[in-house]
Amino acid sequence: MHTVSVLYGGTTDRVWRAIDGAVEFYAAGSLLLLLVTGPLIAWLLHRGLLPVRQLAALAAKVSADSWHFDPPASARMTPELAPLTEAMESVLQRLERAFLQQKTFVSDAGHELKTAVAVVKSSLQLLNMKRRTGAEYKAGLERCLADCQRLEEIVAKMLTLAREESSRNAGDAPATDLAGCARESVSQLETMAGLRGVQVRLVEPEFEVGTAHVGLAAEDCLLLVENLLSNAVQHSAAGSAVEVRMTVEQREMVLEIEDHGDGIDPEALPHVFDRFYRGDPSRTRNTGGTGLGLAICKAIAEKAGGSITLTSERERGTTATVRLPVVVGVEEAVGR
């Protein structure tokens, strides 16, 4: 058996012409398809991105003088844009509230400081109007000194409020025993309460002191309790009592300070935590307050992740309730 090999040779021009024709066909087809679908795709993209452009245009118009931001319905109805739209709206609302709050604070602070400076200036001008006796100069200087002390108190409380608000969510705060702070505050204010004929009663908590701590620095904790307690003492009638109570409810420390004073008018109650608010004469008469004490208390409570509320009845008294998360020893405190 023999193997026979057959060799065949031919020109390749026909093959290459076929290949060139196929390439030209597919190239022309692709170009034609691109010419047809390109404008359609561009139109679809332009239409699809219209809500984004509208959203960006509205956001660009937001400024310190104009906070109006009403996202278009197309952005709200687009599933991919709805979360972004809601987030932008929420952020701008918070920024507006913060900006207006800051603007109001600056305006109120300027008014308070201007008034205090004007009082000092008028006292000095009164002394300088004519020659006076040594006793008159001494009395005038004492008034000026008292006015300066009040001005210093306003500035100190403004700085304290700014510090408390600027340090919100600034990190983990040290844990402090709220019950121990309450005991210390009651001890420090007993003399002042005695001079006003007010008795301060500290109701012993059901849990052991030192077993439940809140997320506040000791300085802030004392400031919170002392502000509320001194406020209650100042607005209590002689012969009455102020009660301080503490409980733990569902991993929250609840501090209640109740006085039996004149109470707060219902229309004034929603504004008591506003800065420099002193709209209720029953809460400001003969107290010399700056209107910042409760605002500072609110800032401290919120910094610790808690809350503060006031309930009041005219001629029956007021109760301040502070709720703060327990960060150390909650199991032991709740179990008691």
Image: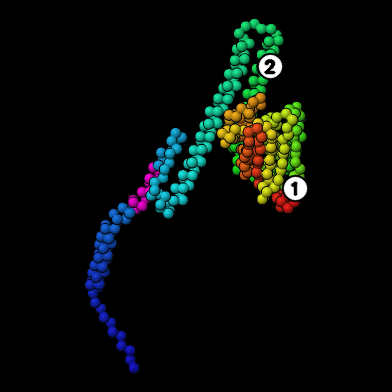
**Residue 22 in picture, x, y percent from top left:** 26, 68
Which amino acid type corresponds to the residue marked 2 in the rendered image?
Answer: Glu
Q: Which residue lies at the image location 36% right of the left edge and 52% below the top edge?
A: 48
Q: Secondary structure at mark 2?
A: helix
Q: Which residue lies at the image location 46% right of the left edge and 51% below the top edge?
A: 83
Q: Earlier in the sequence, mark 2 or mark 1?
A: 2
Of the two numbered discs 2 and 1 in the rendering, the one whose residue sits closer to the viewer: 1
Q: Is residue 143 visible?
A: yes
**Residue 1 in picture, x, y percent from top left:** 34, 93
Q: Which residue is mark 2?
A: 142
Start-end of magenta stretch: 45-57
Whole-Å distance between the Cαs marked 2 and 1? 49 Å
295 up-or-down from 153: above or below:
below
How packed mark 2 is, by other alpha carbons closer than 10 Å (few <14, some 14-19, many 20 or more), is few
64 up-or-down from 128: above or below:
below
Which amino acid type corresponds to the residue marked 1 in the rendered image?
Answer: Phe
Q: Is residue 274 visible?
A: no
**Residue 184 in picture, x, y percent from top left:** 75, 37
**Residue 321 in picture, x, y percent from top left:** 65, 40
Q: Secondary structure at mark 1?
A: loop
Q: Is residue 56 magenta?
A: yes
Q: Which residue lies at the image location 67% right of the left edge and 19% below the top edge?
A: 145
Left or right of 82? Residue 200 is: right
The image quadrant of residue 230 is: top right
The image quadrant of residue 289 is: top right
Residue 207 is tagged as: 1
How packed mark 1 is, by other alpha carbons closer than 10 Å (few <14, some 14-19, many 20 or more), is some
Give the main secondary structure of the magenta stretch: helix
Q: Are marks 2 and 1 in contact (CB under 8 Å)?
A: no
